[in-house]
């Protein structure tokens, strides 16, 4: 019964008008805070007969959804991470982690996917326009047969002028140190391909889950990433 009740709860939540109060001013998008959807979820689950309880261990955050009629349950887990907020006490860092974990556990349970909202607003235009902006244009035959000699004062074209850069960053690392080094290097490299402020914002949106994770585990690395975005974004101001 618990599976049926959970699906009913998800469908009812889809018909609820939820307001996003979280704001990311840098990237220019809104997101759901825990308080934006949890009251609605609790009301729906009380009506269908589900009790949700969040618990924590050193390794995992756990959300247990139990059918109050027959006792069947669904368990959702998420690996724990550390937070190192500047100027915060250990208990405050723990509270920040638990708040993030509760948010992600409930979003997983109720299939709340914020990317759907972003994809529904502009994606069709972006995906259609990007190939046009970066379509490869072959060089004239003469240039292919014999590269022209550079004249003093000439400048070379951007290294990826004729390619379609992929903004998604994928990292495979054995430990956190290597992961953070690769993240910083990849971010710097990707930003060097950007030719407009919109592309800078797009890159942040595409990789925001990666950056959100490092914001919790290594805030100092997140700050360095944000400095890169700010510096790059500033280059295109007034264009």
Image: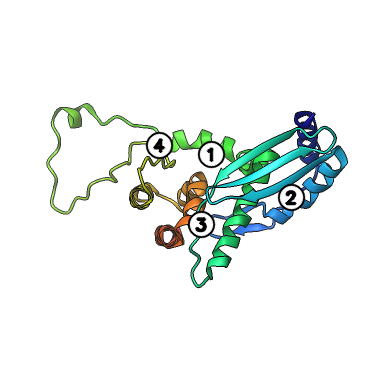
Discs 3, 2 touching: Cβ within 8 Å: no
Find disc 2 in the rendering and name its residue.
37
Left or right: 170 with respect to 64?
A: left
The CA span between labels 1 and 3 is 30 Å
- Tell me if 15 is positioned left or right of 95 in this view: right
**Mark 3 neighbour class, 10 Å CA radius: few under 14, some 14 to 19, many 20 or more:** many
State which tag comes first along the sequence, 4 or 3.
4
The residue mark sitting in front, 3 or 2, is: 3
Residue at the (72%, 56%) spot, across then down? 35
Query: Is residue 116 visible from the viewing direction of this image?
Result: no
Residue 147's place in the image compared with 53, above or below, is above
The residues bearing labels 2 and 4 have C-alpha atoms spaced at a distance of 40 Å
Residue with the mark numbered 4: 134
Would you say 4 lies left or right of 162 here?
A: right
Can residue 156 be seen in the rendering of this structure?
yes
Lower sequence index among marks 3 and 2: 2
**Quadrant showing the C terminus:** bottom left
Separation (CA) of disc 1 from disc 2: 29 Å
Instruction: Please name whichever residue, 157 or 22, is drawn nearer the observer in this view of the structure.
Output: 22
For disc 3, the marked residue is: 216
Q: Residue furthest bottom?
A: 87
Q: Which residue is mark 1?
A: 126
Tell me if residue 202 comes above or below residue 70 in the rendering.
below
For discs 4 and 3, the disc positioned in front in the rendered view: 3
Q: Quadrant of residue 162?
A: top left
Earlier in the chain: of badge 1 and badge 3, it is 1
């Amino acid at each position: 019964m618990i599976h049926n009740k959970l699906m009913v709860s998800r469908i009812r939540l889809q018909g609820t008008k939820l307001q996003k109060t979280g704001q990311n001013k840098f990237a220019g998008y809104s997101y759901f805070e825990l308080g934006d959807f949890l009251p609605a979820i609790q009301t729906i689950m009380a009506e269908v007969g589900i009790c949700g309880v969040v618990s924590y261990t050193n390794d995992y955050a756990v959300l247990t959804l139990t059918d109050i009629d027959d006792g069947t349950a669904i368990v959702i887990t998420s690996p724990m991470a550390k937070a190192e907020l500047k100027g915060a006490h250990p208990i405050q860092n723990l509270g920040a982690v638990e708040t993030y974990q509760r948010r992600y556990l409930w979003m997983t349970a109720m299939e709340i996917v914020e990317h759907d909202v972003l994809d529904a607003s502009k994606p069709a235009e972006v995906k259609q326009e990007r190939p046009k902006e970066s379509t490869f244009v072959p060089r004239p035959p003469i240039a292919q047969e014999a590269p022209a000699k550079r004249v003093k004062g000439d400048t070379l074209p951007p290294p990826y002028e004729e390619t379609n850069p992929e903004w998604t960053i994928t990292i495979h690392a054995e430990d956190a140190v290597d992961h953070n080094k690769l993240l910083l290097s990849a971010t710097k490299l990707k930003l060097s391909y950007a030719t407009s402020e919109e592309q800078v914002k797009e890159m942040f949106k595409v990789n925001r889950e990666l950056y959100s994770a490092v914001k919790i585990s290594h805030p100092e690395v997140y700050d360095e990433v944000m400095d890169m975005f700010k510096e790059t974004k500033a280059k295109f101001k007034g264009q």
